[in-house]
Amino acid sequence: MKVKCDFCGTMMNDTESVCPSCGAPNASVRRSSGDQPLTIEELKKWYESKGLPPENVTRFFIGKNVKEPKAFGIYFEEASGNYIVYKNKASGERAVRYRGTDQAYAVNELFQRLKQEITQQKMRNVKQAAAGAGGAGNPKQSLAKTGKSVGKGCIGCLIAIVGSVAAMFVFMIILGLFLMRNDPSAGYYTYDNTCYYYSTRSYDDLNWFRYDGDAWEGPLELAQVPDSLETKKSSKPYFTKDTWDSGLPCSDFKESVYGQDMQEDMYVSIGYYRCGDLYYHLNSSYNEDWFHWSDQWEKVEFSKLPQDLRHPSQAKHYLLSQTYTSSLGAEDFAQSLVYRDSQASQTASRGYYRVNDRTYYHQGYFYDDEWYSYDDNDGWQPIEHNAMPEELHHPSMVQDFYYTDTWDPATQTSDFTDSDFYEAPRENDSGSSSDSDFSWDSGDSWDSGDTDWDSDW
């Protein structure tokens, strides 16, 4: 990662101890530890030391330019002298995360993504184990433990499975009938000389709309809907028609912008939009993850978007491109800090961090929890995350400022473990994010199908 020299302003690699231009010490130098490989070879050794499954299972290829779909990787391109960090999506399309000469930065990009994947896979194993503990169990394991005959065990398991499926089926039927019985029927209603429309297709989890004499408005919050229209039984006396005709005192709901949105299945394409300014829509949910470009990409609340961008049927007319091109007049969203934060692991290693000329200690699990700073007068004191340096506000950057997990009297004033706030990590303590947390147990399984292979990173 590049950092700025405090004395002359020159940009330099954060692994350099002194500025190459003026010779001043680099206060933000990143020191390698067992948790922070800086070269491709070190990353390979870290991978091997964790006991992780083979690369064709995890789909992380270190030092290889793999062309097949569903692959993360890093390699050195001799022709250009660049280090390339990439992800091949399920479609085979390649998303390049980094291309440049800073090997430590490139390695860290893949390293953080690998640790994020390990965390996700471990969580999947825990959830599966919990689900198994609460269920009927594996028939083969049950037979092995009890010593019962195979035939009797299979029959018992079959009966248990059939009984569970039947019970679930009956429950779903009862639940469905209950919901169908209580939800109003789709169509037009007249209440207090006002037309309403109920749609079985949800619009941001809301279904009711009201005609104000000129146009349809909504979707209505439940508090805005007359009590008499809330259930199927109570709304029945006010039901007019299920389809529109010219005799109704309102326009055809299907011709309204809301009706057209529903015909679009509430879908908005991922890509760059221009409606006065540029916006980027991060995922396929029409009302989430919009970002606005000014001097940088910033998240914008859905309610503050231009009216047309709030409607999927209208937003499509403002789509410029689904992929980045240099002619857009904005930077590549996939390279922005806000996007990288959204894709990064939300955890941070337990240990010492250094920003500018100050030392911090993290003993939590998530990057924004349990931070402490050292003061010459007050010693170690807890610090709110919003009072932390900007560099430690971002999950995609925080690990760049982690330089040791143990106290070093040569570089640190005080040992945090001697403070009143220190809590020793317990075995399997989720509050610790040490290097050992990423070791892979032989009993764990890795399912690369659990990875989101359609995203850029």
Image (cartoon, helix red, strand yellow):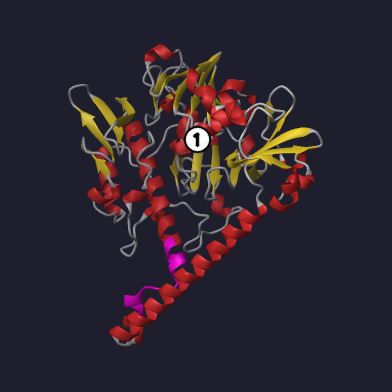
Number of marks:
1
Residue 73 vertical placement versus 298 (above, below): below
* In the image: residue 1, left or right of residue 93: right
Q: Residue furthest left?
A: 79
Tell me the quarter of the image containing the C terminus. top left
- Magenta stretch: residue 451 in it? no
Q: In the rendered image, which residue does mark 1 sit on?
A: 265
Q: Is residue 354 visible?
A: yes
Q: Quadrant of residue 26?
A: top left
The percent position of residue 335, horizontal first and vertical second, equals: 42, 26
Find residue 270 and report its horizontal and vertical position in percent.
44, 29
**Quarter in which the N terminus is drawn:** top left
Look at the picture and state if 100 lies above or below 373.
Answer: above
* Image coordinates for residue 13, horizontal then vertical, percent: 37, 26
What amino acid type is highlighted by mark number 1? Asp
The range drawn in magenta is: 128-142
- Magenta stretch prevailing secondary structure: helix
Q: Is residue 42 left or right of residue 132?
A: left
Residue 397 makes an appearance in the image: no
- Residue 178 location in percent, x, y? 63, 59
Out of 218 and 443, give the one closest to the viewer.
Answer: 218
- The answer to whether 349 appears left or right of 148 in the picture is right
In magenta stretch: residue 135 = yes
Q: Residue at x 28, y 30 (%)?
A: 84
